[in-house]
Amino acid sequence: SGDTASAAPGGDVRLTRISKSYGSFTAVHPLDLTIPAGSFFALLGASGCGKTTTLRMIAGLEEPTTGTVSLAGQDVTALPPYKRPVNTVFQSYALFPHLDIYENVAFGLRRRGIKSVKKQVHEMLELVQLGDFARRKPQQLSGGQQQRVAVARALINHPQVLLLDEPLGALDLKLRRQMQLELKRIQTEVGITFVHVTHDQEEAMTMADTVAVMNGGRVEQLGAPADLYENPRTTFVANFLGTSNLITAEVAEKSGEDLVVRAGGGRLALPAQRCTDARPGDRVLLGIRPEKITLSHADDAGAIPDGRNRLTGRITESSFIGVSTQYLVDSPAAAGLSVYEQNIERDPRLVPGAEVVLHWNPAHSFGLDADQSPL
Ligand code: ATP
């Protein structure tokens, strides 16, 4: 149907024992990673974790110290960037200021000596919804529009893999959110593999099918966004992807599907399959997300259904943030527990100083080995 985009199939990305050292400093430790063709993959981590270095090794902009990169089944480790079936979109859009949008997008085709570019350029401008802007100069566009030009300019070369290095970093929050959905739509439409580098967990979770959380030059956990959020395997991942309450506890027993732990003089349960190695007497961390907890005033404790985990506590702070109220609660099991309550039926008694019961479905808890890393 003249859809050029679908003519470029995605390629998979396979990194085998790839690493990068600068002198005695290892930016990326030997890494094995397979990114399936056609997926939207995010490398997520704090500044300095090695995500950009990993991306640049895929692009060919950085030579790996060890290991190989293969793209669409071909070992490209020894190929320069321009011979690889990839294109990169950077945070600085690097558009040509003296060329209009049309010519910016046409650039890659013209450089390859292709004469009739009109149809393809227009298709690309439609894809990024800039059909009416062809004759404007880059400085006459907003940041988000310029970013879309940069994407169109990269996609017109029909890469099998598009690499995006913090492409939305220069945009304000609202525009960022719009562009996240826009890039996701474009990826779905063209079907090629996107590898996206970001330090913004919400961005990675919104856009990607699979997220690799990097820390200290290593992938700490890899998975679908919901899986990482609900089943973090390390304290780093638990804390990097949103707020988590981590309660130090001691394993009491296994009871059917549940692992029962002791914390602050009470007993809490969590799914045993999330802590398969735990033995009675072991120290574990029980994790629970703030929005999974319900706060009841202590006077209403009798109305809490059986089978829920419960902790007594006292509210130390509350802050109204529109759609929800965020509470901090001190409990004998842990100080400073975070609780987010939707403001649907606010209980006026839930103010600092109030005695409360925090309760939640045990199935929403996750467990971590308490000794794996310092808190
Ligand atoms: P950011 O989000 O800040 O770009 P990042 O996670 O992408 O961070 P990288 O750019 O991959 O991190 O850098 C990883 C580590 O390697 C950092 O500690 C960085 O200082 C170091 N590094 C990167 N390039 C070089 C270089 N050319 N020489 C020495 N060290 C480098």
Image (cartoon, rainbow, N blue to C red):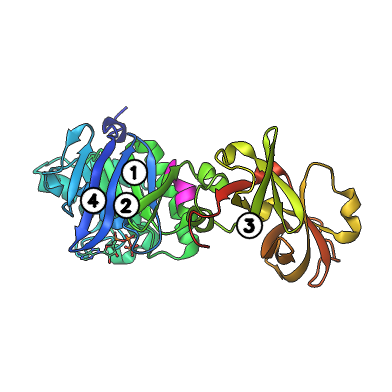
Q: Amino acid at mark 3?
A: Thr
Q: Amino acid at mark 2?
A: Leu
Q: Is residue 208 magenta?
A: yes
| Residue drawn 87% across the image and 54% down it | 301
Label of residue 264 in the image: none
Question: Splitting the image into 4 quarters, where does residue 22 fall?
Answer: bottom left
Separation of residues labelled 2 and 3 (CA atoms): 39 Å
User: In front of the other: label 4 or label 1?
Assistant: 4
Q: Amino acid at mark 1?
A: Phe
User: In front of the other: label 4 or label 2?
Assistant: 4
Q: On the image, numbered disc 1 is attached to which residue?
A: 194
Residue 360: x, y in percent? Answer: 74, 48
Q: Earlier in the sequence, mark 1 or mark 3?
A: 1
Residue 6: x, y in percent? Answer: 31, 32
The boundaries of the magenta stretch are 204-210
Q: Badge 3: how crowded within 10 Å, few (<14), some, or many (20+)?
A: many
Pick whichever, 357 or 60, lies toward us: 357
Asked if 271 appears above or below 290 in the picture, the reply is: above
| Residue drawn 19% across the image and 44% down it | 67
Separation of residues labelled 4 and 3 (CA atoms): 35 Å
Separation of residues labelled 4 and 2 (CA atoms): 20 Å
Pick whichever, 254 or 118, lies toward us: 254
Q: Earlier in the sequence, mark 4 or mark 1?
A: 4
Horizontal side of residue 311 vs 17, given as left or right: right
Q: Do the residues under discs 1 and 2 have CB atoms within 8 angstroms?
A: yes
Q: Badge 4: how crowded within 10 Å, few (<14), some, or many (20+)?
A: many
Q: On the image, numbered disc 4 is attached to which residue?
A: 19
Label of residue 248 in the image: 3
Check disc 1 and report its element: helix, strand or loop: strand
Pick whichever, 264 or 356, lies toward us: 264
Q: Earlier in the sequence, mark 4 or mark 2?
A: 4
Q: Earlier in the sequence, mark 1 or mark 2?
A: 2
